[in-house]
Structure formats: structure tokens, C-alpha cells
Amino acid sequence: MPSLHDFATWQPLLRLLHVAHAETLSTPGRHVAGQISPGAWSVPLPFRPPQPGRASQISDNQEQFDAVGRIVEALEEDGSDGVSFVVEASSAPGDVRLHLIGPGSSVEPGVATAHPGTLLLADGALPEPVRRLPDPVPDAVPAPSADVELLQRTLRERLPDAVGASEGEIAAAEARLGMPLPAELRALYQVVRGRYEDWDDYREPYDTIGCELLPLGEVYVADAASRRVLWRFGAMAAVETGPEDAVQGLVGSPGWIVFGDNGGGDRIAVDLTPGPDGHVGQVIVIGHEGNIGAGLVADSLTDMVVHRHFDGRPVQRAERLPLVAHVNRVSLPGIEAAAHPGLEVLSIGVWEKEPLSLAPAFGLPRLRTLSAHPGSLADPCEISRLTHLEYLELPPAEWRVLLDAGAVPTGLLAAGIEAHRQRDNPLQTIALANEILALCGRPPITDITVLEGTAS
């Protein structure tokens, strides 16, 4: 098997990069960079378009797939989740210097970039939405449509050959979950235990129940820990549940019991911690592409299975001040328009007017996240007056100002460096990241291997 740290493993990819970026990789100080993992990669190589009238095929870019494939094999052999790389011109003509960057213990992986991801500045710290538990709704009750006997009778009529779970299997599942199964879910599994080998045609139970039923041994609680949320995404979101909401806008809940899948990766769950306008035992869908929230499917399992309701209910959303505010050239016209006591996240994007002062945000009691685009702030040192920040994302130049002025806010749990994917050298971003990590007493990024050789 190829070795990850053997130059020969990388040579086919380096040869392609050298052809695609000949001028860059012959100029000292310039670079190309990318990231490769077993499941995906981001490599700065052009894709050949497919022939007219034909869909794109692997063979159209076979050289690239083969070159990356060698590195993926090496990653799998090494047991690594991924590697970032930076290629620079070396001192000898035609040679290149390859920097291989491994993940650091104080850094989350970057997303499709060689630049370091979120810097973790406190052990075990999680974004605020991930820390949130459901609010109590003491008046919540099961929906009028919930009917255990009707549900069970209908299932037996529609699935006469189904094999149900034994009381012992149900008891084992309840012990593993640490809670009793809700009455409707227990009734469902008493008729259909959810094992794939019980069916000649897997579509039969799907068509009857309305989802792919998980085997009883795979039922799980979709608490916040079950939904992996990267810091940079969690910090930019806010938990919000209005009086008109049937489902609480959480990352996860100890009352979300997943029992199915919609066939596309979205999970179907019974909800025991509903929103103010919901019902105990309602059915919800937890999207696999989102980081927060869930949608209502039906008011009860009976409603879903017997009455074939899959779309929830219309919701008239009330107007309220946003917890997450976006200030940019097409959204809010300034920080004054965004500031209010409940504001949690302030994101300043592309700004074509005079740079902004953060003064309107001073003293906001819940403002925990600030993200700012290059050149959008009149005085980056004003950030030190935002005393409740947990997450701060800035471009390298703004971080440089804060570090030189000793104005990095205390109390940060995580930080992001918004570097340009190709223009900014990841090695310089790493050096800046190490300054921030050192300031917070965190281990630096040191897993960097340098290899040199001929790309051609």
C-alpha cells in the first residue's frame, strides 16, 4: 500500500497540479492548496467537460481520480480522516515543496479547504444551540388522533404477515434507551419489528407505515450529541421556538426518539418534547442537511399511518426581531438596524459603504457570535467591548490588529479565521492560528510534514 508521507504517493497528483498551475508553481512564494479525505476532496484541478449529449463520467477525468485515489488508499491505510496540503515552488527548477498538514487537537477540520477550521479555545466547549435543552411545555398532551388500538388494528390488517417484536425485545430496547417506548411506538413494534429479513419486498412496510422502519435494536434518541454540528455552523445559528410552533427549534432533544428514515437520509422520530402548539407523541422529520430544527410530519403515529398525513399543519409565523442578523449590501442596512437586546448572532458580510462601527452592539446581553467580512469594520479593536462573545470569525488582517493591540476578547470558546481559499497561504493562516491558540493556552498546530521532489 502507498505511504501517505512518501513523495511517490503524491507525484501523480503533483504532476497534474504542476501542469494546471505551471506559472504559480514556478514562482517563489506562490502556492496551490487542497484537502483530501476518504469520502471527498477539494483539489484545484479543472474538470474536463463531458462530450455533448452525454453525462459526465469518471473516465472523463480518469487521471485525476487515479491520482487522488492513491492518496485516499494511503489515508485509509494510515487510519486518517483526511489531510490538507500546500504545494510551493522549491529552490531547484521543476521541483516542488509539499506540506502535508494533519488535524490538530485544538482545531476542527476545515470545510473543503486547506486552511485550518475552527480553533477550539476551551476543552469540551460546544456552540450555544448544541447546549440548549428543550423548554418545558407542561400543558402538552397527546393529539386527539392518537389511538393505539386503531393503529395496531390497521397495521395488522395491512400487514398480515408482519412479525412483531417480543416483550423481551421491547424491554431490551427500553433499557438501552433509558426510557419506556411511547404507547403508539410500542404498539407499532408489537406488530412490525422492523427487521429487513422479514420481508421479500422492503417496499411493503414502507408503503404501509410511510417510512423505512428501523429495526428495534437501531431505534435511538436524537439528542444534540447525535447530530454532529461543526462550531462554525452551530455558532451562526440560534434556537428559536415561538408560541405558534409545534416543534421546538433545537439541534436535538432527549425526547426525540428516531424510529425511521424517509429513504433520503432524513430521520423520522416520535417527539416527546413538543413546542407550544404541538402534541406529545407527534411525528417529526429531522433533516440530514440542516444543523438545527425539525419539521412536523403528523400529530400522532396514528395520524401518519392510518390517515396518511405526512405534511404537518400550516403555520402562521409571527413577526419578531431576528436572533440572527445579517448586515450586508442586500440585507440589513447597518448595525443599528440589527441591534436589539435579544440579538445572538451578528454577521457582517460584503459591505460597500464606509466601514461600520460596532458601537450600536455594545452592551447587548445575548450577543455571543460575531462574523465580519474583510474591511467591514471601522475599528476591529471595538470587538473587545462585546463582552459576551463566545465565537469570533474574522479575516487575517483583522485578527492581526486584535493580536497586536492585545484586544482579543477574553471568554471566547472558539474562533475562526476567514481566509481566502486560494489567495491566502494556509501556512500563514496556521501561523496566525497558532498565535491565537497560544494566547488561550491551547496546543498549536504542529502536525506538518514537508516533502520535496520533482513534480514531473
Image (tube, rainbow, N blue to C red):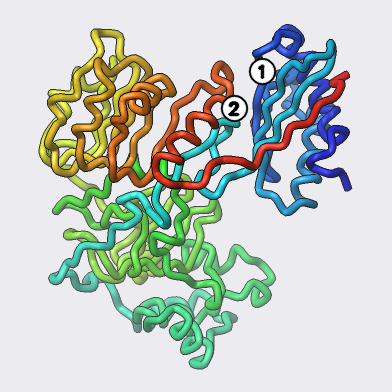
Q: Is residue 40 visible?
A: no
Location of residue 324 by image quarter: top left
Q: Residue 211: x and y, percent?
A: 49, 62
Q: What label does residue 427 carry, if any?
A: 2
* Viewer-proximal residue among 89 and 320: 89
Q: Residues within 10 Å of mark 2 (few under 14, many from 20)?
A: some
Q: Residue at x 22, y 60 (%)?
A: 275
- Residue at 18 percent across and 23 percent down: it is 335
**Any mark on residue 31, and which?**
1
Q: Position of residue 347 (x, y in %)?
A: 30, 29
Q: Element at badge 2? A: helix
Please identify the quadrant where the C terminus is shown. Answer: top right
User: Which badge, 2 or 1, is on the more N-terminal residue?
Assistant: 1
**Which residue type does callout 2 highlight?**
Leu
Q: Which mark is residue 178?
A: none
- Picture quadrant of residue 415: top left
Q: Which mark lies nearer to you, 2 or 1?
A: 2
The secondary structure type at the circle numbered 1 is strand
Identified at 58% across, 83% down, the residue is 163
Is residue 113 rendered to the left or right of residue 153?
right
Task: State yes or no: discs 2 and 1 in contact (Cβ < 8 Å).
Answer: yes
Q: Residue at x 41, y 68 (%)?
A: 305
- The residue closer to the viewer here, 137 or 196, is 137
Q: Position of residue 96 (x, y in %)?
A: 79, 20
Establish if 9 lies above or below 228: above
Residue 452 appears in the picture as rendered: yes
How many callouts does the rendering have?
Answer: 2
Q: Amino acid at mark 1?
A: His
Q: Is residue 94 left or right of residue 37?
A: right
